[in-house]
Amino acid sequence: MDSLTAFTIWSFAASIIGVFIAFFVRRLPSHGWVAILLLLTATLAWMRIDSGESSHPTSLLMSMLFCITAPVAAVYSFRARRHAADRLVALAAFVGGFIIAGFYLFMLAGLFFWTYEIFSRSPHSSKVEPTAGLRVAMIRNARLQKAFEKAASQKSNSLTQLSGPAIDFLREEQTVLSNCYTAVKPLIQHRLLDMADIKTQADLEKRRMLVLKYIDANKGISNYYGNVEFDFRKMAIKGGLPDTTVDQQVKWFHTNLNRMNNIPALCEANERWAKCELEALNLLVSNRQSWSYDGSLRKTVFKDENLRTEFNRIVVEINTDYKERQQILQQLQQELKEHPIR
């Protein structure tokens, strides 16, 4: 569970507790000064909630305190307006209750939004599985290799001469796909750089190596896609196909390749996403003494405010690049679903 998920869940739990308590405060004696005290507590808690990426250690605690005290303060101040002996103080609390109620509704709207974001990125609920297309392509490639290996073993088969070049072509493709699959899978288990998994210098270096490996694999996909049509033609010619057949097969290949014409954009988005995460990791490595991981709060705590601001800025970029990557991937998968490769 990352810090955003924990923040949302615990804040919702605190809201439920606060609403539950608010039902019972109507039975308590009404005093204007008590209403003012509750409103001040809720206000101070609201002011202490950090608006960044939840790296400030008081964010979760203050959010929970606000979610508990805000509904209680609002209900109590509304009731004190009618029943409190100190009417003037109760009137001031009544006005403040509307303000706190507005802040509380704003907070609830934000929690509902983040709940949607959490479930939309969940591996079980997301409609876009980043490695699904790679797996399908690898399975299809393996089947084609077996088919050509079988044809190569049949000496009288018309595909015998083509089988050797075709198998070499497919093996190269399988290597590129396999490298990308093994590189991307460890990185997409969490959408963001999850600091719960990075607590030591060794964890940082391990993650950096994974990101660098992925960047190389992504470049391999991009380069392969840029040359694959030329390589396909060369394979067909080497396989002894007549010129007319070569032209027909290249035309067929080109048509199927056009259905994946957003692969270059996907590779570019992949590279931006990975380089932003690498930037965040390098920032942590070069400032190792200026941050620590608090296991009880499940948060990274920064001693330097400027460092925390810079880290949060990079994380926002990671978020943005990842969402763009997912959109392109979804478009690619939809295109291949509507127009599958034949």
Image (cartoon, rainbow, N blue to C red):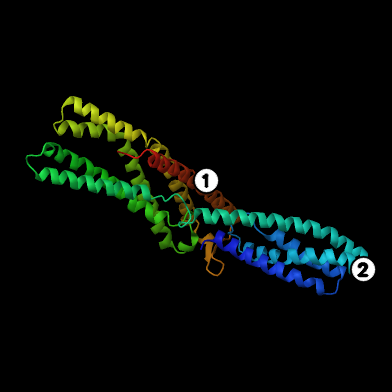
Label 1 sits on a secondary structure element that is helix
Q: Classify 10 Å Cα crowding around label 1: few (below 14), some (14-19), many (20 and above).
A: some
Where residue 236 appears, as percent x and y from the top left, is: 19, 33
Q: Is residue 295 above or below residue 338?
A: below
The single residue placed furthest to the left in the displayed view is 156
Q: Residue at x 68, y 69 (%)?
A: 17
Say whether residue 74 is left or right of residue 130: right
Q: Quadrant of residue 335?
A: top left
- Direction from residue 203 to residue 235 in the image, left or right: left
The residue lying toward the viewer, choosing from 45 and 79, is 79
Q: Which residue is mark 1?
A: 320
> What is the three-letter code of the residue carrying label 2?
Asp
Q: Secondary structure at mark 2?
A: loop
Does the rendering let one see residue 274?
A: yes
The quarter holding residue 303 reads bottom right
> How many numbered marks, from 0 up?
2
- Residue placed under numbered mark 2 in the picture: 86
Q: Earlier in the sequence, mark 1 or mark 2?
A: 2
Q: Residue at x 66, y 67 (%)?
A: 14
Give neighbour class at mark 2: few <14, some 14-19, many 20+ (Cα, 10 Å): some
Q: Quadrant of residue 35?
A: bottom right
Q: What amino acid type should be assigned to the residue bearing mark 1?
A: Thr
- Could one spot residue 271 in this view of the protein? no
